[in-house]
Amino acid sequence: MSDSLVIIPTYNEKENIEKIIRKVFSLAQPFHVLIIDDGSPDGTAEIVKSLQAEYEGHLFIEERSGKQGLGTAYIYGFNWALQKNYDYIFEMDADFSHNPDDLARLREACVNGADVAIGSRYVKGVNVVNWPMGRVLMSYFASMYVRFVTRINIQDATAGFKCYRKIVLETIPLNKIKFVGYAFQIEMKFTAIKFGFKVVEVPIIFTDRTEGTSKMSTRIFREAFLGVIQMKVNSWFRNYSR
């Protein structure tokens, strides 16, 4: 058995999914893996299901119809994890931009007192590999913008590689998390901090995907830019006591 669940949302990740699953299960620390697949037409879900017999009781898949957004996939996964009573719940991409070897470091941070551990690209300089300079600058300055608007001291506000202690996801009203793209990542960090949880950043090296296609879009970026202001204003009228 494992007290740790890695949630990996997928849409058209057939080039990466078997390799990322096998890598996670090769680690010394035992993890379970939950794939949330949004109806990938490329056969991603079928690859996962073909591996379930090999990793019985450790590999799970939930299939949804159509692309419903990253945020809703994670909320679905969080509720699934809470029902199964996992103590440590992780977010991770399928494309190896997040190194599975860092899962143990994020877990260790939470074991040692953090409530949320963020795999941070910017806590020690800029640790990004294979991104064009324009995207590095956009991401870096997006985090500066988030800090300016929200006043939270997080260097990598849009990071999507995280470990949560169960108590965080039990406390945050997940049905009130509204954003679906990068704004979702910002909203979860902001809300955890507003509830008084300890959020720490663990330095990682982020490597851009080498296979498959990015899901980034101007709509997602626009949601994040405008959503930060909306989120900050809404926070003035919310009760964050627990």
Image (tube, rainbow, N blue to C red):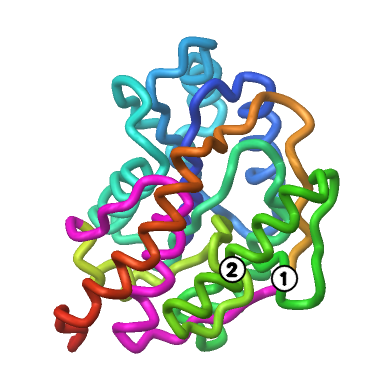
Q: What amino acid is found at the position of numbered circle 2 in the picture?
A: Ser
Residue 89 position (above or below residue 12): below
* Residue that mark 2 sits on: 143
Specify the quadrant of the image occupied by residue 12: top right
**Mark 1–mark 2 CB contact (< 8 Å):** yes
Q: Which residue is mark 1?
A: 122
Magenta residues (range): 175-202
In the rendered view, tell whether residue 16 sits above or below residue 238: above
Along the viewing direction, whichever of 104 and 3 lies nearer the viewer: 104
First reached walking from the N terminus: tag 1 or tag 2: 1
| Rendered residue at 50%/71% (across/down) | 146
Instruction: Give percent across and percent down for residue 28.
Output: 70, 57
Is residue 171 visible to the viewer in this orientation of the structure?
no
Question: Residue at the spot x=29%, y=45% of the render?
Answer: 76
* Dot 2 crowding, Cα within 10 Å, few <14, some 14–19, many 20+: many
- Disc 2 on helix, strand or loop? helix
